[in-house]
Image: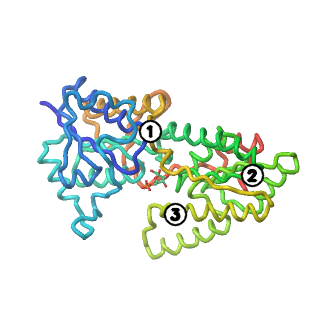
Amino acid sequence: MTLSIGILTSGGDSPGLNAAIRGVGKACQAHYGMHVVGFRDGFRGLAENRTMALEGEALSGILTLGGTILGTSRDKPHKMPLHGKVLDMTETIVANYRANGLDCLVCLGGGGTQKNALRLMQAGLNVVTLPKTIDNDVALTDTTFGFDTALGIATDAIDRLHSTAHSHHRIIVVEIMGHRAGWLALGAGISGGADVILIPEIPYSVEVVAEAIKARKRKGKPFSIVAVAEGALTREEFAARQAAAARKKDKKVKEPAFEPELVYAERTLHLAQQLEHLTGLEARVTILGHLQRGGTPSAADRLLATRLGTAAADLIQQGRFGVMVAARGESSEAVPLEQVAGQVKTVPPDHPWVDSARGVGTSFGD
Ligand code: F6P
């Protein structure tokens, strides 16, 4: 019997998605003789039955491409804006899965995708997922594809900002993606030698940051790079957030997935203004934004995406469904979706990367 597989990409795009689509698709078709079809624009395309043929030459030449040839969206199966309403499209998705004669749906995505895939599994579909996101915040996997590429881009940006900050004796505050977890700001901050790193997991005090910058100035270094993750919070903001979360928990109100980008940008601008005021140095802001997600995947991401993609094909052939293919050392591991969904892999404040950063004198503003 020939198995039929559907593939979709969901959530924010990430370098390595095409390498993963190719890995799953080629291994399923060439190695196991399965039939493979793509769905466009994430769960929306599955709900609207918009397919893309992935046979023949369709998977050739995409290994090095950024973005996703399938398109993506942040739509959720059970809450999809459609025809001016927000509809539960789960039944339609199940019907389209059956109409396409699928034996398994492979969902490539981050934390939200893992939750949505679990919902579809509970609705009766065979599902396998892969972990992608530049934020590196998917639980129970060593890492996610997209992270390494974004890390390289953000590090390169910090390198470039150094020479201009140095020349003008300025503070440059560089905002790096990561609304829930600070892996990217932390990794790029260490690799680029940022003087201050601010991440959501370690609430900071503006005064402490300003003091670290002034201490550098006293040592003859009147310039500083502050790498700030989108979701970094001051101690006060952190306490207010905790209190609001507790109130919401009581009332069982859902928190939004993340804040609009302008809110992050406003906070970053405000931070730069405060630092200018407190240190007497000029400050500038650079928001790296979607540059971090665009373009060619790094070699490490192509390798990881290909490894996990082909491992997904192996699991499908074995009939092992309801799992995420996690990166584990040089190999991979099938982790039950129930264990992954709803979890966020944040940076432990005592993580070795944090210790190393402190070891070379980086301030976390705490
Ligand atoms: O995919 C995760 C992420 O890159 C976050 O770091 C960032 O906050 C968010 O996506 C931005 O998403 P969008 O492209 O939908 O604005």
- Dot 3 amino acid type: Leu
Give the x, y percent position of residue 312.
32, 34
The answer to whether mark 3 and mark 1 are in CB contact below 8 A is: no
Looking at the image, do the residues carrying marks 3 and 2 touch, with CB atoms under 8 Å apart?
A: no
* Foreground disc of the pair 3, 2: 2
Foreground residue among 43 and 64: 64
* Residue identified by numbered label 3: 262
Disc 2 and disc 1: Cα gap in Å?
30 Å
| Separation (CA) of disc 3 from disc 1 | 23 Å
Mark 2 or mark 3, which is nearer the start of the sequence?
2
**Residue 275 higher or lower than 27, as above or below:** below
Side (left or right) of 109 relative to 260: left
Q: In this view of the protein, can residue 283 be seen by the observer?
A: yes
| Residue named by callout 1 | 295
Q: Secondary structure at mark 1?
A: loop
Query: Which of disc 1 and disc 3 is earlier in sequence?
Result: 3
Mark earlier in primary sequence (2, 1): 2
Please tell me whether mark 2 or mark 1 is closer to you in this view.
2
